[in-house]
Image (cartoon, rainbow, N blue to C red):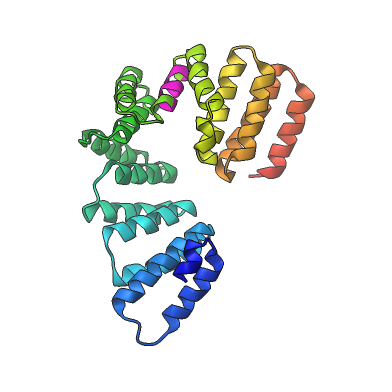
Amino acid sequence: AINSYNEGNYDLAIAYFKTALAESGVSRDLRVDILKYKAACEQQTDNYNQVINTLTELISYDSSPGNRELRGKAFFRIADYNSAIMDFKASIAGGMKGYSQYIELYEAQMAQGDTTEAEETLTEILSLEDKAGAYYFLKGMIHLKSGRLEEARDELENAQVLGYERADLGLAELCIEKEEYINAKRIYDSYINGGTADSLDNSTKAKIYSQYSKCLLKLGDSAGALSYIQSAIDLADNDTKQTLSFNLICVYEYLGRWSDAYNAAANYVNSYPD
């Protein structure tokens, strides 16, 4: 099973792990190890309902904060935000009090619509002390989303000084918020033309292309804007794709291409009837 896992043959690995778990006389420690591997394989196949089942069995043997966090992430992926929140809170209460754990909790609370609790979580995040560039980046993005633009710039520049690569992307978003489109475009140009974007995951690339499209539209390059919003849609996950598909309608309207806007809107309504 482990060999199959290392070779990327996850379905076969899962079958072997199931066989191993069915054997009699499996010790508790070995069962815990098998369940961890099995959950990792299932995550690779995006079978998050099965991930949850496996992690729930694992937690019956080992309810460590790390395992609760892993299950919380899986609950988040299937939009069971209430269960995700409970697992994230248990993880933090068990001693995992890093900024990433608080960010996970905050995002689940926002997705659930618990804005009051989310604001309390934000307050806890901002009171943490950590010298990592990723921490300053997250603090900067929190300030940015809250409209505290100068505080956002300070924290993002701290992250940049510490060499945190995505700090530039945060500063680009800040430039867009301040309508400094030329500065934002320069940052995105560096990411896209320099090849940095190629090494990023599709979700992040989709966001970069979407923001870049907005810059190009504001700077008068309508053809470029249209090209990049379409590229963003191709790369986006299902949740983000809905927002970007709506943005595509707006781009067509902005360009005065009413027939294309109508067709894009018709496709949108057909794809997202709710």
Q: Is residue 18 above or below residue 65?
A: below
- Depth order, front residue of 72/6: 6
The image quarter in which residue 114 lies:
top left
Q: Picture coordinates of residue 38 (x, y %)?
A: 44, 67
- Kindly identify the residue that appears in the image at 64 percent across and 38 percent down: 234
- Is 174 included in the stretch rendered in magenta? yes
Q: Quadrant of residue 54?
A: bottom left
Q: Is residue 147 above or below residue 65?
A: above
- Magenta stretch bounds: 169-176
Between residues 9 and 207, which one lies in front from this camera angle? Answer: 9
Q: Considering the image in quadrants, where does the C terminus appear?
A: top right
Task: Tell me where residue 143 appears, x and y as whole percent.
Answer: 34, 26
Q: Nearer the viewer, residue 123 or 97?
A: 97
Question: Majority secondary structure of the magenta segment?
Answer: helix
Q: Residue, x 57% and y 29% (percent of image)?
A: 209
Percent across and percent down for residue 204 are 50, 36
156 sits to left or right of 264: left
Residue at the extreme right? 259
Q: Is residue 8 visible?
A: yes
Give whichever of 262, 18 is nearer the camera. 18
Picture coordinates of residue 266, whole percent (x, y): 74, 36
Decide if residue 52 is in sight here.
no
Q: Name the residue: 34% across, 55% down.
A: 69
Q: Is residue 79 shown above or below 59?
A: above
Q: How many marks?
A: 0
Whether residue 247 is in magenta: the answer is no
Q: Quadrant of residue 66?
A: bottom left
